[in-house]
Image: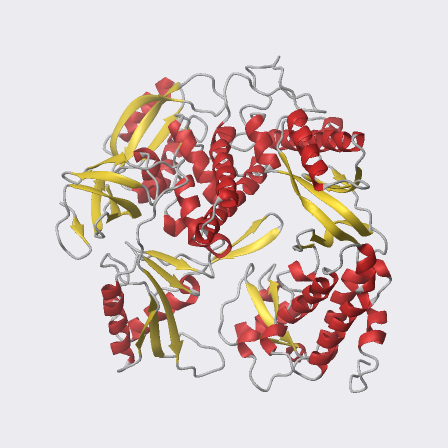
Amino acid sequence: MSQSSSGSISPSIVRGWLLDLYPSNPREMTIWVISEDGQRLKLIDRFQPKVYVAGKEEDLKRLVDRLVGSKSVAAWRFTEKFVNLSDAEKSKVLEIDVTDWRRMPHFARKIMRLGSYEKFRLGNVDVPDAQAYLYDRDIFPLAFMEVRAEDKMLTYRLLDSVESENYAIPPLHIVWVSVDVVKAGKIPSFGDPVARIVLKSDGKEVVLSKGDERAKLLAFVEAVKDLDPDIVFTHGGDSTLFPYLARRALLNDVLDRLVLGREEVPLRAKRKHGMTFFSYGRVYFKAPMRRLYGRIHVDVENTFIYRDCGLDGLFEVARTCRVPLHKAARASIGTIMSSLQLYQAVKDDVLIPWKKREPETFKSAWELLIADRGGFIFEPKVGLHDWVGEVDFASMYPFLMAKRNISAETVLCECCPASSLRVPELGYNVCEKRVGIVPKTLRLVLKKRADYKQLRSEGEDPKLKEVYDRRQNALKWILVTCFGYLGYKNARFGKVDAHIAVCAFARDALLRTARLAEERGFQIVHGIVDSLWLKKEGATAQEFVELCKDITREIGVPISFEGRYRWIVFLPSRMHEGVPVLNRYYGVFENGKIKVRGIEARRRDTPNFIRDAQLDMITVLGKAIDSEGFMVRLPEALGVLKGYVKKLVKGEVAVEDLLVAKHLSMDPSDYVHNVFQAIAAMQLVSEGIEVSAGQTVRYLITDAESKRLSLRVRAAELVDESTRYDLKKYLELLLAAGANILSPFDFTTEKLYDLAVKNQKQVALN
């Protein structure tokens, strides 16, 4: 029988929500369920991962003979699957139950060696164990279901649906954990003892500060057990907090008692290194996961989806894409999105390739020139414009992929050479006999997101509207990523030809839209990939709405009217005067909402002080009804800038608001030039802090022109009361931000210096 977290025997049939799952013993999967009556129940299910081997039948039979007696093989059988995504018929393959999921990589390599690396193709080798279980049982995280437990075997009856938009979430116990240390140096280290441990839950605070360090650690274990949280939140739990606590427990000889999960598994003292990886032209760092079995640990510094979309967004993507909650909290959007495709492959009896074998179709140089292009753009008309309307295609690329049936196996398929569905400009045929795996997965996400947006707009409950908004925002990231994965070299079901086809359809849609708009008297002020900014003398908002309806009807791709700007400013390049830039503008809608793109206020590395100054200037300008009023309010905006200059000069700015946050593109020691972020990173390294490529360092500029590198900046962790900022440098940054948004009106940094700084005699910039 199974047991609850309190030790009582659970019933053989239970109704509740799936919270957590993980492999325990080699042939078992542990499941944690929150029952309707609030119990946290641990259930055990027999489960063995499967690997599939494809090849010639005689080779497979010889392989079976050689695998007899293998410790990795629990059972085997022949079955039929689609070996390749593009196969029209199933093939006979060997299905092998592997005794232990940990042996899977070794076993797979052994099979490849036995086949001389050319006879066999393997499928479903590296599907994560918990996800493989979810696919096999056709369940998902936080699914409400009925579970029947009998002799370590579970059977499920779903009382929920992954398509549901009004699902219930069980009441969850949540705890935030933080630790204060007795610092011996400027930065806390693993050698510093615990000062106190704080747990916050339901507005209450538990402070553990009495006794020696050993007593505090043991009291922490008991407090977690008493509070019995389902979700544990930390700041830096993966990278620092939990490894630190484990280290202190080891030194106090209580590591074996430092149990924070519902299983009797203590935290590990070994300090794992994180992983640095490259994606979409940027280097990222991922801290190693610190698992609390039976609970969900969310490190808010090691999660994208929670930081951007909250728990509602996290729950939504975990349910929709069938990814365990602890993994969804840390995984990239691409990894989460891929899980939905893997599930679809399992459902369709398609083998998930271990080594991708979907090459790009050969193209001549001329064909590459025609095909390998991105989205279409109309250069913006630099300057100030009145009453410009913005129209956007709703999830254009994903919609085209779903509507036009674009997938790796459907573009240039061999079964439909005479297909009537052709890719614009290129003439590629698209399959008409079957729906591709990518469109199948996208249709669910597109529908749910559209429904959530409608529920948000029609709802009256503010809290519920916020929930719907977070859910649709999380699904938006899934849709954004799916297009990039079509051309990603390691995507399981991607192919460059499909990626190219989407771009061609998108260019065609934007050009046809522009033509229709111009035929109706609209002027194109700017256009980029899936958005257009249009202007027409005397046009009402209703005319824009009617235009969008006509475009949707004629093009077949939904386009929406985002609103009219009272005024909008398209900015030129900062490097090349007068040259337009695609995504640098700011403006104010009729309802007073301000929108900014591509300026300092949108950059993550901009100090709060500079960001606030720029936004306050735009807010003042935003009171203007049109361009004439805009020009009238320019002096007032300059007055705002002068006020910020005055604060900076008088030293009235908090150091925290001047910190710059920079992303490390390489390890600190690999930098050739002495850029500020490299200097700050090396300061941290010298204090014993591990810093890797992909991480973000924060620093204060202290003396930008100092000959001593260490004096140019100060890492945020080393800033104290005596640290002073570089007034000259921060004035330069402030004036540059002001000049950036006012550049179309002949305001330069030098001119703003004369207007805002020169008359303040106490300032010396030279």
Q: What is the basis of the colouring in this image?
A: secondary structure
Using the rendered view, name the quadrant where residue 65 is placed: top left
The percent coordinates of residue 732 (x first, y second) are: 76, 72
Label tally: 0
* Rendered position, 428 above or below 330: above
Using the rendered view, name the quadrant where residue 571 is placed: bottom right
Residue at point 55%, 58% (across, down): 694
The percent coordinates of residue 485 (x first, y second) are: 55, 38
450 to the left or right of 563: left
Residue at point 72%, 82% (across, down): 649
**Quadrant the N terminus occupies:** top left
* Rendered position, 721 above or below 141: below
- Residue 109 seen in the figure: yes
Residue at point 47%, 20% (across, down): 87
632 to the left or right of 566: right
Using the rendered view, name the quadrant where residue 759 is placed: bottom right
* Rendered position, 314 above or below 551: below
623 to the left or right of 28: right
The percent coordinates of residue 545 (x first, y second) are: 67, 36
**Quadrant the C terminus occupies:** bottom right
Q: Residue lying furthest top in this view?
A: 418
* Rendered position, 474 above or below 574: above
- Depth order, front residue of 169/722: 169
Residue at point 32%, 37% (across, down): 160
- Residue 107 seen in the figure: no
The percent coordinates of residue 301 (x first, y second) are: 47, 61
